[in-house]
């Protein structure tokens, strides 16, 4: 249902809503609402994949890279999943 709410917004409002969601997700740490935040992020990605990737995915991956030491040593292009599972 949330996907439809994002999808039915006019493009400019959808971009603004995704931007505000991205700002909320990247600046707040609220462990009690992780499932709800995930639902909102999923809905944003479903409704506008390009905007969600730029506004949500890229900043979240940058934060993850900054917080996980040694992540740059991982070869995510390899076919072996053993390297990824050691993180």
Image: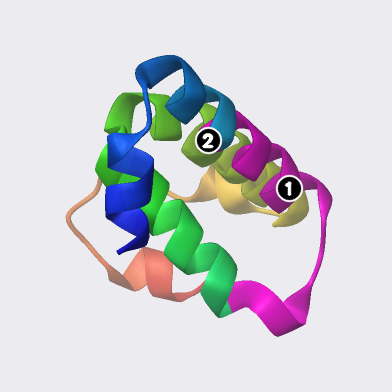
Image point 60% across, 30% down: which residue? 19
In the rendered image, the residue lying farthest to the left is: 79
Residue 61: mark: none
Q: Residues within 10 Å of mark 1 (few under 14, many from 20)?
A: few
Q: Is residue 6 left or right of residue 41?
A: left
Q: Which residue is mark 1?
A: 24
CA gap, disc 1 and disc 2: 10 Å
Residue 71 horizontal/vertical position (percent): 59, 51
Q: Is residue 79 left or right of residue 36?
A: left
Q: Which residues are magenta?
A: 18-34
Residue 48 horizontal/vertical position (percent): 31, 32
Q: Nearer the viewer, residue 4 or 30?
A: 4
Q: Magenta stretch: dominant SS?
A: helix
Q: Which residue is mark 2?
A: 18
Which quadrant, please, contains the N terminus? bottom left
Q: Quadrant of residue 59?
A: top right
The number of numbered badges drawn on the structure is: 2
| Residue 21 against residue 85 in the figure, above or below | above
Which quadrant, please, contains the C terminus? bottom right
Residue 4 horizontal/vertical position (percent): 27, 51
Residue 83 horizontal/vertical position (percent): 38, 65
Residue 77 makes an appearance in the image: no
Would you say residue 31 sits in the magenta stretch?
A: yes
């Amino acid at each position: 249902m949330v996907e439809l709410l994002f999808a039915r917004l006019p493009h400019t409002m959808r971009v603004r809503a995704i931007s505000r969601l991205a700002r909320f997700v990247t600046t707040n740490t609220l462990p009690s609402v992780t499932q709800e935040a995930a639902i909102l992020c999923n809905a944003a990605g479903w409704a506008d994949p390009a905007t969600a990737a730029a506004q949500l995915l890229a900043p979240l991956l940058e934060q993850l890279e900054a917080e996980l030491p040694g992540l740059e040593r991982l070869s995510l292009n390899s076919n072996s999943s053993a390297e990824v599972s050691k993180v």
